[in-house]
Image (tube, rainbow, N blue to C red):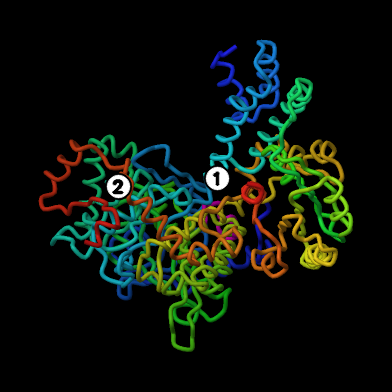
Amino acid sequence: MRYTELLTQAEVKRTHEASLEVLETVGILAHYAGAREVFKKHGCHVDESTGLVKFPADVVEKYVAMAPSSFTFRGRDPQFDRTIPDDGPIVVTGSSAPNVVDPVTNVERRATSTDIANIAHLINELPGFDIFSISTLADDAPAGQFSLSRFYPALKNCLKPVRSNTPNMDDLRQVVELGELIAGGKGAYAERPIINHHYCPMVSPLTMDVDSTEAVMWLTERGLPVYTTVVPNAGLTAPMTMMGCLVVGNAEFLAITAFQQMVREHTPVIYASLPTVADMRTGAYAPGAIETGILLAGQAQLARFYDVPAGGYIGLTNAHSNDAQSGFETGMNTVLGVSAGATLLNMGGLFSSLMAFDFAKAVVDNEIALMDKRVYRGLEFSEDNLALDQIAAIGPGGSYMGSKHTKQRMKTTAVLPKLAARDMRAQWEGAGRPDIHVRALAEARRILSQPNPAVWDAGLDATIRDHFAGLVAGDATPLEALEE
Amino acid sequence: MGDEGIFEQLKQSIVDQDEDAVLEAVNKALADGVDPKTIIDKGLLPGLNVIGEQFENEDIFLPELMQAAKAFQAAMAILEPKIKEAGGDGQKKGIIVLGTVKGDLHSIGKNILKLLFETSGFEVHDLGIDVDLFKFIDKAGEVNADIIAISALLTTTLIGQRDVIDALKDQGTREKYKVIVGGGATTEEWADTIGADGWAGTAYEAVNLANRLVS
């Protein structure tokens, strides 16, 4: 497929040069001393009194060129491992919302570790999702187990790759320890690290923080999988032009990528972003706005220039329910992303600008994800697919319905949606006029009423629970049971 | 004779939607001296019942349903003459006159319906597409039809269905026939408005409707 390209090659090159100019003349403010040390050692100009780092263009180009062209996510079951761009587009849930829309009362509340277990079970079963980025926080986390209370229920209930972040180094070490227990030892874990780490160390504009930067450095040194997202917000943390926003985000991507290569050469990265244009009527954050899709399309083109995989948070919504806004924001933006060649879509399950997870939204997004993957397959041009033999055999006025050719392809040529209505109005009225939310929630309930085959064996569970005293239960529960 | 294995083979060949296997099983059964009527009742129809259930559960899709029906039809082409030869009347559930209304050239849905009607044991007189309203009425009189089934895909040709019903009323023959309507442009409400005897959203439902109307 030929990707949608919004920029000419000359414009891509000029955007790259402009980003180098920003890094060379404006620089990056690096708050973490360890990072400044790395930059200094590898040819950057560091002002210790201000923390400002300036990057010679040749230094940036040298290190960014070391970034490999692919990135692999690993799951508990290797059949769910995914490498982008080749296995793309891969679809990831939205992450770290503090709240959940209660599936029984439909009222938003703080999310718990049981919600995470249920979401993990659901994502494990929904075919459109490839990666479970832990969707919520866990309000019931015991002291000292903030991150464990998220990763434990997530990993226990999902065979697909699990991805998330940690707020500090103690939590990060604990989570890696959990991974090593699951893998059966440090050596086995180094071979197949099944926890996929993600951070946003770049704080727009042009600033590197302490905690996330330290975590990225620690993981990169150990060769553990970690990637970062840049988050420029036009009007607030970037200029109020699409190109200005792209340049700030690109300079930030180049800085963090050069940093990771300086720490460990040939470390896999993803050019991931969440670019937005702020709604200047109020300053509101607008990840669901169409500009996010346009910016991500530009960024996917830049990623191809650097020969690294591209994607990011695309298809998030500002809507608060499964209404038309939720559908058009997720649908339009992700279609822009995949048609431009983004192969990582961080899109599923969240309302209200990443504030709350909703079970039905995740099921709707599963269906959108399957459509996005279909978009990416495009027209599948081939001599065989021109089907000239068929056209001749059926002839004018005939029907292709009964042919073997049709039968062999009827389940793969088109997406067969589970939720989208294809029946007649009378049938829909007969069923009580169920809207998309009702249909999706019924599917979530159906899935969660089944036993979860992904849960690991009792022996491993006992080992983990012995190691981390006071751990949350981390078990999925049918939604009906929550009603009692 | 009386070998249950052959009936299982007949049934399975229909379930497999495999026309060659159906014909092979039918010929084998005939060679073994199994009565043609028994081949249908104990072998082929149980297979079609399974196909019908699978279709309703979305385990199989419309092209598969049609392949099974076509395989059944191919078997009937052999069996029907033999039943007639033996003096059986090849008893039909009912007689249906079928066509697409005047001005409408769409035939695919109608043809699917014809196949399913025939597979279900109806005698079908297909008038084709772009059918003048009096052709429906004349043919129904000629073959002494039970049902007139009128298809329309285009919203602009829909009124052709009402024209047939109105003409039947004018002639005083409306009560002689059950008139059913269907096709992409139709709804149940439309069918009620024009005074039709029934409407179906899919070919499969239309067969159930016809069964109800003749029973």
Q: Is residue A186 above or below residue A357?
A: above
- The kind of residue on which mark 2 rests is Asn
Q: In the image, which is nearer the foreground, mark 2 or mark 1?
A: 1
Residue B178 numbered tag? none
Q: Is residue A140 above or below residue A123?
A: below
A304 in the magenta segment: yes
Q: Position of residue B177 (x, y in %)?
A: 75, 55
Image-based side of A408 in relation to A399, left or right: left
Q: In this figure, which residue is indicated by the disc labeled 2?
A: A157
Front residue (pair B210, A98): B210
B41 in the magenta segment: no
Residue drawn at the location 67% of the way across and 40% of the way down: B63
Q: Residues within 10 Å of mark 2 (few under 14, many from 20)?
A: many
Chain designation of label 1: B
Q: In this picture, which residue range is highlighted in magenta?
A: A301-310
Residue that lies at the very extreme toward the bottom in this rendered image? A281
Q: In this figure, which residue is indicated by the disc labeled 1?
A: B56
User: Mainly helix, strand or loop, the magenta region?
Assistant: helix
